[in-house]
Image (spheres, grey):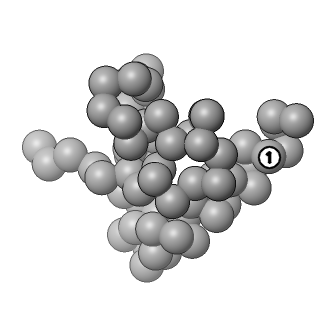
């Protein structure tokens, strides 16, 4: 099975979301994040478009 390269380095939230790009710092339960990312990429969204949506959602949850 091939891994999914989630481009968390594109996030505007360095202390939170970008930890995914720093290898080994964040684990995601059973891989739902990677699966959702794969579906978004398969639907034609760019890495930047996906991370902008993630950032918008993250901003609504974290002050």
| Quarter of the rendering containing residue 42 | bottom left
Q: Would residue 2 appear left or right of 43 to someone viewing this image?
A: left
Residue at horizontal 58 percent and vertical 54 percent from the top: 11
Q: Is residue 58 above or below residue 19?
A: below
Along the line of sight, the residue nearer the viewer: 62 or 35: 62
Image location of residue 44, percent across then percent down = 43, 78
Residue at horizontal 11 percent and vertical 43 percent from the top: 1
Secondary structure at badge 1 equals helix
Q: Is residue 31 above or below residue 39?
A: above
Along the line of sight, the residue nearer the viewer: 30 or 8: 8
Q: Is residue 54 above or below residue 43?
A: above
Residue at horizontal 57 percent and vertical 71 percent from the top: 49
Residue at horizontal 48 percent and vertical 34 percent from the top: 19
Say few, some or many: other residues with alpha carbon within 10 Å of mark 1 (under 14 / 14 to 19 / 20 or more): few
Q: Is residue 45 above or below residue 52?
A: below
| Quarter of the rendering containing residue 37 | bottom left
Residue found at the very far front of the displayed protein: 14
Circle 1 residue: 59
Image location of residue 7, percent across then percent down = 41, 56
Image location of residue 4, percent across then percent down = 28, 50
Question: Total label count?
Answer: 1
Q: Would residue 54 appear left or right of 50 to someone viewing this image?
A: right
Image location of residue 18, percent across then percent down = 51, 42
């Amino acid at each position: 099975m091939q891994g999914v390269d989630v481009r968390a380095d594109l996030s505007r939230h360095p202390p939170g979301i970008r930890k995914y790009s720093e290898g080994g710092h964040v684990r995601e339960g059973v891989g739902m994040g990677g699966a959702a990312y794969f579906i978004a990429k398969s639907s034609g969204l760019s890495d930047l478009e996906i991370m902008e949506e993630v950032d918008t959602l993250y901003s609504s949850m974290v002050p």
